[in-house]
């Protein structure tokens, strides 16, 4: 099986954080976590998590949420607004 590293993965949970863009995408207004990723015929071996554009004051919480995913779901490498844009150390 061919291995895949997803270089741009968004995860979100609108019950925990505000994502204004979801107002225009009602079908996506639900939690989207690692269990929802479908790599098709590939073996997903990792992913680069990219922020899902929550409110600025929620960015660090978003990163913590991804960081706290169970070990078997934590295939994400953090690439986030909290550290890169706001200079917050994790």
Image (cartoon, helix red, strand yellow):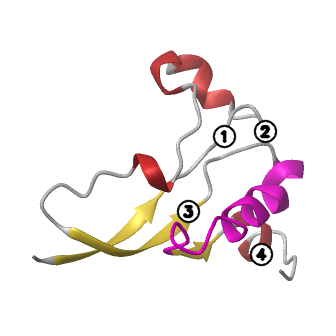
Asked which secondary structure carries label 1, the reply is loop
Q: Nearer the viewer, residue 81 or 60?
A: 60
Point out the frontmost of discs 4 and 2: 2
Q: Residue 84: percent from the left, percent from the top?
A: 72, 75
Label 4 – label 2 distance at C-alpha: 20 Å
Q: Residue 42: percent from the left, percent from the top?
A: 17, 67
Between disc 1 and disc 4, whose residue precedes?
Answer: 1
Label 1 – label 4 distance at C-alpha: 20 Å
Between disc 1 and disc 3, whose residue precedes?
Answer: 1
Magenta-drawn stretch, dominant element (helix, strand or loop): helix
Disc count in the image? 4
Q: Are marks 1 and 2 in contact (CB under 8 Å)?
A: yes
Label 2 – label 3 distance at C-alpha: 17 Å
Residue 63 lies in the magenta-colored region:
yes
Q: Residue at x 29, y 51 (%)?
A: 38
Mark 3 sits on what residue? 50
Label 1 – label 3 distance at C-alpha: 14 Å
Name the quadrant containing residue 60.
bottom right
Q: Residue furthest bottom?
A: 89
Q: Residue at x 75, y 31 (%)?
A: 15
Q: Quadrant of the C terminus?
A: bottom right
Label 1 – label 2 distance at C-alpha: 6 Å
Mark 4 sits on what residue? 83
Mark 2 sits on what residue? 16
Between disc 3 and disc 4, whose residue precedes?
Answer: 3
Q: Residue at x 73, y 67 (%)?
A: 68
Tell me the tag on residue 13.
Answer: 1
Q: Residue 67: percent from the left, percent from the top?
A: 70, 71
Q: Are marks 1 and 4 in contact (CB under 8 Å)?
A: no
The residue stretch that appears in magenta: 56-75
Q: Quadrant of the N terminus?
A: bottom left
């Amino acid at each position: 099986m061919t291995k895949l590293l997803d270089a741009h993965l968004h995860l979100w949970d609108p019950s925990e954080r505000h994502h204004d863009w979801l107002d225009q995408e009602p079908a996506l207004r639900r939690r989207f976590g690692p269990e929802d990723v479908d790599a098709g015929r590939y073996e997903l071996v990792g992913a680069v998590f990219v922020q899902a554009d929550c409110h600025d004051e929620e960015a660090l919480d978003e990163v913590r949420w991804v960081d706290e995913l169970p070990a078997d779901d934590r295939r994400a490498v953090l690439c986030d607004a909290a550290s890169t844009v706001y200079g917050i150390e994790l």
